[in-house]
Every structure is written in structure tokens, then in C-alpha cells.
């Protein structure tokens, strides 16, 4: 039943759903975050890797080709990423939400929280099905990608 729920929501913890993403090479962002469990709502510290529209997590930071993620979220299925200190009553907290689920995280500092929100938010926009390549604007170069 849980795997059906994950398939329906696009949220997955299936350790084989990598879509060819080489998460161990040149990730867009990595770092420690504390994540709330999906079923038992305990907090666990995990190493996160953001690459090619997927947010992977691992038990430790020594990520290699042989590493197996503890979970992966395709960020294109997510709608928002934003601060959640008020909801959780914890400093440096943020949430990642899809249509039907919300995951909560705690960063080690305010700066780390903001960096993760910015990186995940950028990835959501880049990998969203509603944005085509021709619509992506490179603000650093003041030109649209064509």
C-alpha cells in the first residue's frame, strides 16, 4: 500500500529510482540536514545530495558509486519549498511540499537553510514540467536560453 501511495504522489523512497543520475559525481548541493521520518515522526540526521532534479539522502557523507540512497524525492513533483520554523517551532526548519505530502527538514544554520531553500527552489523550477527550456531565463547573462 505504501509503495502505491508513493507512486501516486511521485514521492519515492525506492532505492533504484535514480533515472541514471550519477549522484556521486559533481552534485549541485550536498550537506547534512535533519529529516523527519515518514511513518515514525522521529528526527534523523542524513547526508543530502541534490542533483539533476532529485534530492537523495544517505546515512553518511561518504557517497560513492556503490552507495545506496535511503530515499529520493523527484523535486519536479514538488510545488513549494519554504521556511517552517513557525510550524515546527524549531529554528532553521523548512518544508518541501507536493500536492499530497510535506517533508520537514532542519538545517544546521540560518544560512544553510536559506541555501537549501534556494537550491531546491531553483531545481523545482528547472525540472518542472510546466517550464520548457525556451522559457528558462539566465539572469546572470540577461538572455533567454534558446
Image (cartoon, rainbow, N blue to C red):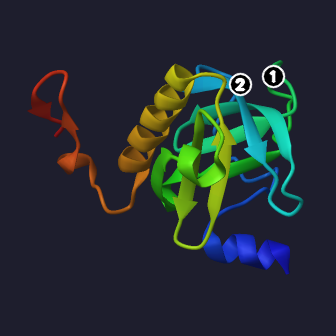
CA gap, disc 1 to disc 2?
5 Å
- 5 above or below 91? below
N-terminal of the pair, mark 1 or mark 2, is: 2
- 93 above or below 75? above
Residue placed at 55% from the left, 49% from the top? 86
Q: Quadrant of residue 64?
A: top right
Crowding near the residue tagged with mark 2, few <14, some 14–19, many ≥20 C-alpha atoms within 10 Å: some
Residue placed at 40% from the left, 56% from the top? 128
Tell whether 38 sits left or right of 98: right
Q: Quadrant of residue 105?
A: top right
Q: Position of residue 112 (x, y in %)?
A: 55, 23
**Secondary structure at numbered mark 2:** loop
Q: Position of residue 125 (x, y in %)?
A: 36, 48
Q: Is residue 19 visible?
A: no
Tell whether 125 sits left or right of 70: left
Residue placed at 83% from the left, 74% from the top? 2
Q: Position of residue 45 (x, y in %)?
A: 82, 33
Q: Mark 2 and mark 1 in contact (Cβ < 8 Å)? A: yes
Crowding near the residue tagged with mark 1, few <14, some 14–19, many ≥20 C-alpha atoms within 10 Å: few
Which of the labelled discs sits on residue 24, or is there none? Answer: 2
Which of the labelled discs sits on residue 64, or is there none? Answer: 1
Amino acid at each position: 500500500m505504501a509503495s502505491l501511495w508513493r507512486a501516486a504522489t511521485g514521492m519515492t523512497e525506492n532505492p533504484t529510482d535514480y533515472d541514471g543520475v550519477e549522484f556521486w559525481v559533481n552534485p549541485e548541493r550536498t550537506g547534512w540536514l535533519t529529516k523527519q521520518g515518514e511513518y515514525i515522526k522521529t528526527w534523523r540526521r542524513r547526508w543530502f545530495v541534490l542533483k539533476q532534479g532529485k534530492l537523495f539522502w544517505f546515512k553518511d557523507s561518504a557517497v560513492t558509486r556503490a552507495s545506496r540512497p535511503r530515499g529520493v524525492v523527484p523535486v519536479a513533483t514538488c510545488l513549494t519549498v519554504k521556511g517552517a520554523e513557525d510550524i515546527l517551532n524549531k529554528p532553521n526548519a523548512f518544508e518541501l511540499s507536493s500536492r499530497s505530502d510535506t517533508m520537514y527538514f532542519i538545517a544546521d544554520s540560518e544560512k544553510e537553510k536559506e541555501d537549501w531553500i534556494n537550491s531546491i527552489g531553483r531545481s523545482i523550477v528547472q525540472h518542472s514540467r510546466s517550464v520548457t527550456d525556451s522559457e528558462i531565463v539566465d539572469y546572470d547573462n540577461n538572455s533567454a536560453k534558446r
